[in-house]
Image (tube, rainbow, N blue to C red):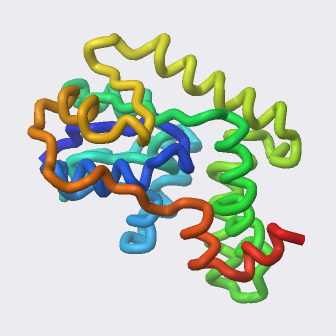
């Protein structure tokens, strides 16, 4: 089995909904940040990959046909070269809405876990800080202009570098039609997945949401 779909979009651009959508139309399983919980040994491998060390990607993605979200989206170009037949999907949303979302959900969660007194939580949170917030955004998460600029540059880079026939630029609100047309799959009779909104996240992490409202 080899990767057939590579998601290049940052987290909080509908990536969890896309994971479920891809699995529903036959790309099962789809890797996502949530999968790291099921593969704790992958945390070391992802760190090494982000440091430029060689990684056995086919072994990493054994059993998976697609990958979306962080941490793989940071290395989308490496994965695109490793799996040259894979299609690339760039998930997008309004930059300011995206910034508000990450600051009230996954960045907040990472920060709280990194400061936790629990060693396991602290290690997990610091891993996310190192690979995403400090590496990608230079640790300047309170600077909206900087973070949204990084977001926009990333998206522009993907669009510029990926051949048009290999790339789908996609927003979750577009639903099944463009996704299924791009991947050559029939449109399911069920609605396109809509999961992990900011409200959903706050229900899962109530302590974080309380702090976000202070």
Compared to residue 14, the image places residue 32 above or below, namely below
Compared to residue 83, the image places residue 192 above or below, namely below
Residue shown at the point (67%, 52%) measured from the top left: 101
Residue shown at the point (26%, 34%) measured from the top left: 179
Residue shown at the point (63%, 51%) measured from the top left: 131
Percent of width and height locating residue 117: 78, 87
Residue shown at the point (54%, 60%) measured from the top left: 197
Q: Nearer the viewer, residue 183 or 45?
A: 183
Percent of width and height locating residue 137: 74, 40
Which of the image's four quarters has the C terminus? bottom right
Percent of width and height locating residue 200: 55, 69
In the image, taking residue 155 as reference, residue 212 lies left or right, namely right
Tally of marks:
0
Percent of width and height locating residue 103: 74, 55
Q: Nearer the viewer, residue 177 or 5?
A: 177
In this view, the residue farthest toward the bottom is: 118
In the image, taking residue 43 as reference, residue 151 lies left or right, namely right
Q: Nearer the viewer, residue 66 or 145?
A: 145
Observer able to see residue 79: yes
Compared to residue 89, the image places residue 212 above or below, namely below
Observer able to see residue 60: no
Q: Residue 151 appears in which quarter of the rendering?
A: top right
């Amino acid at each position: 089995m080899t990767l057939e779909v590579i998601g290049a979009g940052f987290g909080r651009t509908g990536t969890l909904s896309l994971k479920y959508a891809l699995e529903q139309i036959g790309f099962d399983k789809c890797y996502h940040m949530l999968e790291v919980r099921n593969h704790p040994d992958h945390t070391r491998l992802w760190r090494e990959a982000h440091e430029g060390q060689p990684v056995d990607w086919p072994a990493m993605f054994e059993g998976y046909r697609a990958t979306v979200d962080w941490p793989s989206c940071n290395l989308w170009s490496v994965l695109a070269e490793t799996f040259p037949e894979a299609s690339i999907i760039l998930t997008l949303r309004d930059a300011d809405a995206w910034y508000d979302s990450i600051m009230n959900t996954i960045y907040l969660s990472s920060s709280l876990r990194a400061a936790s007194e629990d060693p396991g939580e602290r290690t997990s949170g610091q891993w996310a800080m190192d690979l995403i917030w400090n590496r990608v955004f230079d640790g300047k998460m309170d600077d909206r202009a900087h973070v949204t600029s990084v977001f926009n540059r990333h998206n522009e880079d993907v669009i510029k570098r990926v051949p048009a026939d290999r790339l789908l630029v996609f927003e979750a609100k577009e639903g099944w039609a463009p996704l299924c047309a791009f991947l050559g799959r029939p449109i399911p009779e069920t609605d396109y997945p809509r999961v992990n909104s900011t409200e959903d996240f706050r229900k899962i992490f109530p302590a974080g949401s309380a702090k976000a409202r202070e």
